[in-house]
Image (spheres, coloured by chain):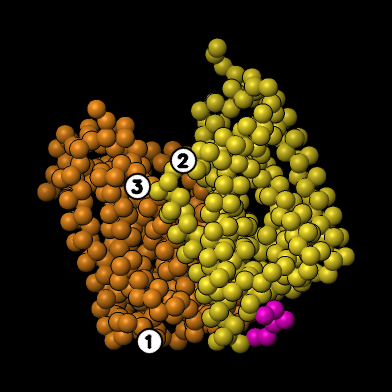
Chain colours: A orange, B yellow
Amino acid sequence: MRQSLSLYLYLIRLQLRTRLQYRASLIIGWVAQAFGYASVYGAIWIVASRFEKLGGWVWPEIALMLGFHVLGYALGALFTLVQLRRMEELVRLGTYDTLLVRPVSPWAYLVFSGFNIEYGGHIALGIGMMVWALPQLGMDWSLLTVLQLVASLISAALLTGSILTMIAAMALVLTRSRYLFGIYFDFWELSRYPITIFAMPLQFVLLSVVPLGYMAYVPIAALLGKPVPVIGEAAPFTAILAGPFMVGVAILVWQSCQRRYQGAGG
Amino acid sequence: MLLALATASFRIESSFRAQFWFKLLSGVLNVIARVSIWQSVFLHGAGSTDISLPQMITYAILGATTFSTWDATQILREIGADIRSGNVVSHLMRPYSYPVSLYARQLGARAHEMLMIGLPVLVVMGSVYGFQLPASPGHAALFILSLLLSIFLLFTVSIAASMIGFWVMDMLALEWSLRGTLALFSGGLVPLWFYPDAVANTVLYLPFAWISFYPLAIYLGELDLLSSLLHLLYGLSWAVVSAVLVALMWRAACRRMIVQGG
């Protein structure tokens, strides 16, 4: 176990050193991606400020939710997205087979050797928006609420990582899974808004089958003391437990796909 | 030959069936997101506007199915891969202009997306949420012209952005910058008439507004026929300017290219 951990840390260090060779390019990438996100948030700001409220939420509340959303996503995706999006290619070209004979879990190898620091822009934007929004909301802070915020942020990151892992695992069985990432991002985009703007069946979907409602809406609604449909009083707990729960599901899915994997070539 | 390129890219797009169904689902979700926002703010929000909810629903459905710009930036990734691998050189040997061939390829993919995905989603979601017809036959005709102009401008802008790749080599940053610019300035997500005046006064004159905002405003009859026509002519001059820009950039890029080996 300790040996594996030090190997993972070494893989991350290796990746960091490689990426830091092209610093200017890295920073330009951060700025451009943050601009891409900020533009969409700008469009949401225009709607929220023009009509005062969106789904019963005012702009500083929405800003806090958007900041939390992009931060939680970035913390999960830097371990998973770019690495695992290549899964179908790894399967098709037979590269995945070479990972199976290494003395380390193929998932862990992929995740840590591809540790992606391109999310600097996301993280700065997310923290910036939260820091801007929090003082305007006049919340009563206590040790418990701080812990709740941190724990639900970790849960959002775990949720991102585990859903992306499950989608990637599908490539082991279906060979093609890239379009599933597209669907993930469509639902992910829905999860940027207070889900009360959607019709009831879609709210239910976002809180159950496609649990992206727990990415930002449930945690922030729980912190702000806003009523949450379907789960009600349980919101603060589900916000913290959704991520760890999905990690468990993802482990089961990954293992079962791995068992069914037969290779794509001859 | 350019028609053949466009047909080929249309066929490539239609050969992935599972992808087709997921793209349909994706189109539906996109419409739901946009329509839900307008329903929510019109029914529960404060602040008055001259636009009605049925008009905004039509704007949202047309905007999501016909004028979505997010995927158009994919061309940057393709050209970026060509530049990095050096494949772009092989286009120099072919009997056509590279930028024009890019138009043809994009046109095929875009036509596929509009006809096979946009249209069914529009019909289904339009019958769910309600969909307005063009304000008048005259507006409908001008809308078709402005749609063609919109497609041309979207391609030109993305090809121009990808030409920058010959100098900066960083396609990811270019792709995201273009995405952001289009999301904010094309009016595809939020119509420019909701923008704060100071911002709108600038954005209304930038070429990006002709990519989504003006065609939709013409469709809904928010501009009268004469001013629609004048705006169309203004947009046309942007098309000429940007096409000249692409031609100049391509010439400069050709001069910059160094072919090694043989």
Question: Around disc 3, counting alpha carbons within 10 Å, would you say few (fewer than 14), some (14 to 19), or many (20 or more)?
Answer: many
Q: Is residue B199 magenta?
A: no
C-alpha span from label 1 to label 3: 36 Å
- Secondary structure type for disc 1: loop
Q: CA distance from mark 2 to mark 3?
A: 16 Å
Chain bearing tag 3 is: A
> Chain letter of disc 2?
B
Magenta stretch: give its range: B47-52
Q: Are marks 2 and 3 in contact (CB under 8 Å)?
A: no
Element under disc 2: loop
In this rendering, which labeled residue sits more in front, label 1 or label 3? 3
Q: Position of residue B218 (x, y in %)?
A: 76, 65
Picture residue at 44% right of the left edge, 78% below the top = A199
- For disc 3, the marked residue is A177
Q: Main secondary structure of the magenta part?
A: loop
Dot 1 corresponds to which residue? A227
**Mark 1 neighbour class, 10 Å CA radius: few under 14, some 14 to 19, many 20 or more:** some
Q: Is residue A255 left or right of residue A44?
A: left
- Residue B243 point in image, percent of width and height: 76, 41
Among the 4 quarters of the image, the one containing residue A212: bottom left
- Which sits in the foreground, A184 or A11? A184
Quadrant of the image for the C terminus of chain B? top right
Among the two numbered marks 1 and 3 on one chain, the one whose residue lies closer to the N terminus: 3
Identity of the residue furthest to the left in this view: A1
In this rendering, the answer to whether A29 lies above or below B128 is above
**Left-right relation of B239 to B73:** right
- Residue A117 tag number: none
Chain at tag 1: A
Residues behind callouts 2 and 3 on a single chain = no
Residue type marked 3: Ser
> Which corner quadrant holds the N terminus of chain B?
top right
Q: Which residue is mark 2?
A: B15
